[in-house]
């Protein structure tokens, strides 16, 4: 830290004789300077604002007081139940793998767990899968959800119903079941492809995007359980031939993220 010059612009002429005031000012300003080598304790009467290249902390022993400390690897450690609070709200996307999630209604009688995700074993099959609260930003807005999947085999014709999903929240007493999209049990399904070959897409990953239009603000995983209602393709007529479609993941897009609270 620095103080102002004792003499204007720090200029001392060769024949200058320091006065008692000069010496008193040097003592005063020196005593109030921060000692960068030996440390010490200071109590500024106003904030110290550092611009330019700011401060770089290079040792593990360095710390910032006030409920947090720094550690190796750029880590910041907070006190119990403390979370970072953003100066302005953020947007964030969270990926939820569907591999080895627990089906709350069927225990995967009709959905097998494969190495890449859930594999539906029959046509016209629905599953309700509970999602961990740690994927949901508390008090944020869930704007869109994207389901990633692959069609498991080629088709000679398009199915009657295409793969789709919806999200819902269930309250703690299990008395309210609120969908996050107004399609409810009709689900938000894959837009109709131009042909059966386009639907198969050579087995490449595909996406169904749902824009949440209700019950999606002030997300609260401590009050609600969030579940995905997953619907596979439907062949019509009660056909139960294997489908073998693979459901990989959900991408949750949040807006209005004010802090890092989850559960």
Image: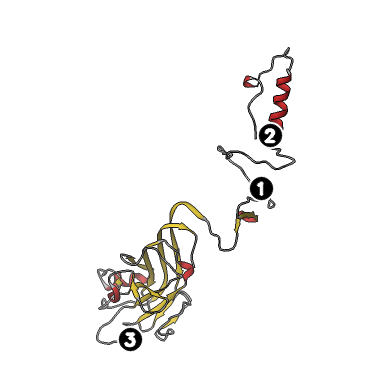
Res. 189 image quadrant: bottom left
Which of the labelled discs sits on residue 174, or is there none? Answer: none
Percent position of residue 125, x then y: 34, 82
- Mark before the other along the chain sequence, 1 or 2: 2
**Number of other residues with Cα within 10 Å of mark 3, as a class: few under 14, some 14 to 19, many 20 or more:** few
**Number of other residues with Cα within 10 Å of mark 1, as a class: few under 14, some 14 to 19, many 20 or more:** few
Q: Residue furthest top?
A: 15
**Number of other residues with Cα within 10 Å of mark 2, as a class: few under 14, some 14 to 19, many 20 or more:** few
Question: Taking 236 as reference, is 180 above or below it?
Answer: above
Q: What is the total number of numbered labels drawn onto the structure image? A: 3
Percent position of residue 231, x then y: 33, 77
Res. 197 image quadrant: bottom left
SS category of the residue bearing label 2? loop
Question: Taking 229 as reference, is 217 above or below it?
Answer: above
Q: Residue tagged by mark 3?
A: 241
User: 90 and 26: which one is in front?
Assistant: 26
SS category of the residue bearing label 1? loop
User: 66 and 38: which one is in front?
Assistant: 66
Q: Circles 1 and 2: CB distance less than 8 Å?
A: no
SS category of the residue bearing label 3? loop
Spatial CA span between label 2 and label 3: 83 Å
Q: Residue at x 42, y 62 (%)?
A: 139
Question: Taking 25 as reference, is 247 above or below it?
Answer: below
Q: Nearer the viewer, mark 2 or mark 3?
A: 2
Q: Residue tagged by mark 2?
A: 32
Percent position of residue 201, x then y: 33, 69
Spatial CA span between label 3 and label 1: 63 Å
Question: Relative to 93, is 63 on the left or the right?
Answer: right
Which of the labelled discs sits on residue 58, or is there none? Answer: 1
Percent position of residue 12, x then y: 69, 17
**Color scheme of the displayed model:** secondary structure
User: 129 and 26: which one is in front?
Assistant: 26
């Amino acid at each position: 830290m620095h103080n102002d010059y004792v003499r204007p612009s720090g200029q001392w002429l060769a024949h200058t004789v320091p006065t008692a005031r000069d010496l008193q000012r040097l003592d005063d300003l020196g005593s109030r300077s921060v000692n960068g080598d030996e440390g010490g304790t200071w109590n500024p009467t106003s904030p110290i604002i550092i611009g330019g290249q700011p401060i770089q902390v290079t040792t593990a022993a360095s710390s910032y007081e006030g409920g947090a400390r720094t550690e190796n690897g750029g880590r910041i450690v907070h006190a119990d139940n403390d979370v970072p609070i953003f100066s302005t709200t953020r947007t964030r996307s969270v990926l939820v793998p569907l591999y080895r999630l627990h089906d709350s209604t069927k225990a995967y009688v009709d959905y097998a767990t494969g190495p890449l995700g859930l594999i539906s074993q029959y046509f016209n099959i629905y599953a309700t899968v509970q999602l961990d609260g740690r994927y949901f930003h508390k008090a944020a807005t869930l704007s869109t959800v994207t389901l990633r999947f692959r069609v498991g085999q080629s088709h000679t014709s398009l199915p009657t119903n295409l793969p789709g999903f919806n999200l819902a929240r269930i309250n703690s007493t299990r008395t309210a079941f609120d969908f996050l999209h107004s399609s409810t049990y009709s689900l938000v399904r894959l837009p109709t492809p131009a042909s059966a070959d386009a639907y198969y897409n050579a087995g490449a990953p595909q996406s169904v995007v749902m824009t949440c239009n209700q019950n999606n603000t002030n997300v609260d995983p401590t009050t609600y359980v969030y579940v995905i209602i997953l619907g596979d393709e439907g062949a019509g007529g009660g056909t139960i031939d294997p489908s073998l479609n693979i459901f990989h993941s959900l991408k949750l897009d949040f807006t209005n993220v004010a802090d890092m609270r989850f559960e």
